[in-house]
Image (cartoon, rainbow, N blue to C red):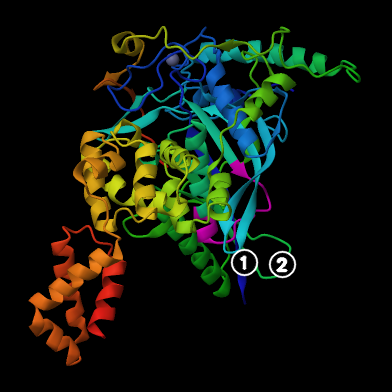
């Protein structure tokens, strides 16, 4: 029997704020344990939470970017459970269908023939927990630096639109880039600021019901997510095919052994005893605030990708090199393109020599001495055949070191490419006269000796001759 | 619906409260009085009354995203039953 896999995705992203969600302790990563704590985030009696305005704004902007409806009136709930990393005995979260700040949205992801839509069920605001750490001697301790850090949860809609490990990966990739380009999260998976938990089910092809699902945890990278989903789907299919029974469960991913293993039984939802937090008044937004944020949204990664491919004629690969974790890189490219010049050439130079030099120096593009105008200048010299590719590399290297404009370097050093055909022909004839043996070999059929002769011409012209013209004239003279 | 002594012990256990038999007795009678009061509330006719979860009429109370306040680690750990290496010691979890 053939099966269809369905994947729902729950993503938690820590928000880029200076302070925590309900207290003004700093929101940061690392540092000494229990040094960013106060009565609120330690859950001490008598303390009261106050909502961080910036965190709310990040979630509203994300919800708008994900084409969500916005809850103009929204409350926080208490999600009750006992765990040592949760000092209050409840997590402040948002519950309900239309109560989360954003709900019923979608995001586009690239597909083979355009884009697919992935529906989003909700985007809500909550707080992170502390961190349970193991101490020598089998003891455990808690660091509450992370407790109360603003956390955004983004959940895909049911039934899921994602059916393959690749789609899951594209979804996570574009969602993560979107958060980074919005400035809502740094998306650092290795620091836990972007965490994803897929739930996976398989059902016979054509069935209108979804199978029993399992939730997969401990996935540390996008690669682990896609391998984990593949593995889990295969495990479920072989269980069914062998007459076994699946049960709803949470499984962990063992990265070392590349297998999933059963974890704790999933708590049923009503066990959390959600209720509105009486300490936190409702959030009420007005139309003007929401529309102001909507109007100020930046161009999002997928829109940018479409524009690069459809309007600028770049390949999907080139577009992916420009749309990265650093929004400044794509902005740099956009600025260069707006100054004129071939987008493809600008892209090649940025992602070739320029990127290599930046990486070597550990510099962001904007802090280097090369501006978008420098790149455009260089590309113009190339496009008008005033310099060749070899010269361009040398000129660019100088430009990177000194900040001098490529065209100024060309003028100062007299580096203009030689395109005058009669002068090139003169040099070609000279090279042939000085190397009669090579000419003889060519006439005997060893035509690749032409490369040697072209090299002689380039030497005579100090590398300035246009290689295409040299090659054409050389062939003409040899075939005479 | 009155709460049983077993349920009370379980809730105390979940809330990490260690109560003596005398305290349990007192808590049992107090809690049952509260619960009885709630059964009276449930008898009220509330059709047509708007749902409200908050006692005061405030809305959209925000704070600016600027760090302030906080406790030193020594202050924070001073109320912990036990601490080690700057961490709050907790019972180990068996999953
Ligand atoms: Zn705090």
Q: Position of residue B89 (x, y in %)?
A: 32, 24
- For disc 2, the marked residue is A207
Chain ID of residue with mark 2: A
Q: Quadrant of residue A418?
A: bottom left
Question: Which quadrant is the N terminus of chain A positioned in?
Answer: bottom right
Q: Which mark is residue A4?
A: 1
Query: Does the magenta segment cover residue A404?
Result: no
Q: Nearer the viewer, residue A260 or A421?
A: A421
Q: Nearer the viewer, residue A249 or A404?
A: A404
Q: Is residue A35 visible?
A: yes
Q: Position of residue A441 (x, y in %)?
A: 13, 88
Residue plotted at (19% across, 75% down): A451
Q: Is residue A339 above or below residue A276?
A: below
Query: Does the magenta segment cover residue A165?
Result: yes
Mark 1, other Cα within 10 Å: few <14 / some 14–19 / many ≥20: some
Q: Is residue A239 above or below residue A152?
A: below
Q: Name the element at disc 1.
A: strand
Mark 2, other Cα within 10 Å: few <14 / some 14–19 / many ≥20: few
Disc 2 from disc 1: Cα separation: 9 Å
Q: Quadrant of ligand 1?
A: top left
Q: Is residue A252 visible?
A: no
Q: Position of residue A473 (x, y in %)?
A: 28, 74
Q: Quadrant of residue A125?
A: top right
Q: Name the element at disc 2.
A: loop
Chain ID of residue with mark 1: A
Q: Which residues are magenta?
A: A155-169
Q: Nearer the viewer, residue A298 or A36?
A: A298
């Amino acid at each position: 029997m053939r099966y269809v896999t369905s994947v729902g995705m729950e993503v938690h992203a820590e928000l880029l704020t200076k302070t925590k969600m309900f207290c003004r302790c700093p929101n940061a990563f690392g540092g000494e344990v229990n040094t960013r704590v106060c009565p609120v985030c330690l859950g001490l009696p008598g303390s009261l939470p106050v909502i961080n305005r910036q965190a709310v704004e990040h979630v509203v902007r994300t919800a708008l970017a994900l084409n969500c409806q916005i809850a103009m009136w929204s409350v926080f709930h208490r999600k009750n459970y006992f765990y040592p990393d949760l000092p209050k005995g409840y997590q402040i979260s948002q519950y309900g269908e239309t109560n989360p700040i954003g709900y019923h949205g979608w995001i586009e992801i690239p597909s083979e023939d355009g884009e697919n839509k992935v529906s989003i069920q909700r985007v809500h605001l909550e707080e992170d927990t502390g961190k349970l750490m193991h101490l020598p001697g089998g003891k455990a301790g808690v660091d509450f630096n992370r407790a109360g850090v603003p956390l955004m949860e983004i959940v895909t809609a049911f039934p899921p639109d994602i059916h393959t490990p690749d789609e899951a990966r594209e979804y996570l990739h574009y969602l993560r880039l979107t958060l980074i380009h919005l400035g809502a999260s740094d998306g650092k998976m290795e620091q836990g600021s972007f965490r994803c938990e897929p739930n996976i089910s398989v059902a016979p092809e054509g069935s209108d019901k979804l199978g029993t699902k399992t939730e997969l945890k401990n996935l540390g990278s996008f690669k682990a997510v896609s391998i984990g989903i593949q593995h889990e789907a295969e495990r479920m299919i072989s269980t069914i095919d062998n007459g076994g029974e699946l049960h709803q469960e949470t499984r962990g991913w063992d990265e070392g052994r590349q297998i999933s293993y059963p974890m704790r039984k999933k708590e049923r939802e009503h066990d959390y005893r959600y209720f509105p937090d009486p300490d936190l008044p409702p959030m009420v937004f007005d139309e003007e605030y929401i529309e102001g944020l909507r109007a100020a949204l930046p161009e999002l990664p997928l829109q940018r990708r479409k524009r690069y491919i459809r309007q600028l004629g770049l390949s999907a690969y080139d577009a992916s090199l420009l749309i990265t974790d650093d929004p400044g890189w794509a902005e740099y490219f956009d600025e260069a393109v707006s100054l004129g010049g071939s987008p493809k050439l600008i892209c090649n130079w940025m992602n070739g020599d320029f990127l290599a030099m930046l990486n070597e120096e550990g510099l962001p593009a904007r802090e280097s001495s090369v501006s978008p105008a420098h790149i455009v200048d260089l590309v113009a010299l190339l496009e008008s055949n005033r310099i060749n590719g070899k010269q361009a590399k040398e000129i660019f290297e100088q430009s990177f070191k000194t900040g001098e404009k490529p065209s100024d370097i060309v003028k100062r050093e007299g580096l203009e490419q030689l395109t005058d055909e009669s002068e090139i022909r003169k040099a070609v004839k000279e090279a042939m006269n000085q190397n009669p043996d090579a000419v003889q070999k060519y006439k005997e059929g060893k035509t690749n000796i032409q490369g040697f002769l072209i090299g002689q011409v380039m030497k005579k012209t100090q590398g300035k001759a246009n290689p295409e013209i040299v090659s054409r004239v050389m062939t003409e003279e040899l075939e005479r | 619906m009155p709460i049983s002594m077993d349920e009370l012990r379980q809730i105390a256990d979940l809330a990490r409260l260690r109560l003596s038999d005398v305290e349990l007795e007192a808590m049992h009678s107090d809690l049952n009085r509260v619960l009885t009061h709630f059964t009276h509330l449930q008898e009220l006719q509330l059709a047509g009354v708007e749902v409200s979860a908050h006692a005061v009429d405030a809305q959209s109370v925000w704070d600016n995203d600027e760090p302030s306040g906080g406790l030193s680690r020594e202050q924070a750990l001073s109320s912990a039953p036990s601490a080690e290496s700057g961490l709050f010691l907790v019972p180990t979890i068996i999953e």
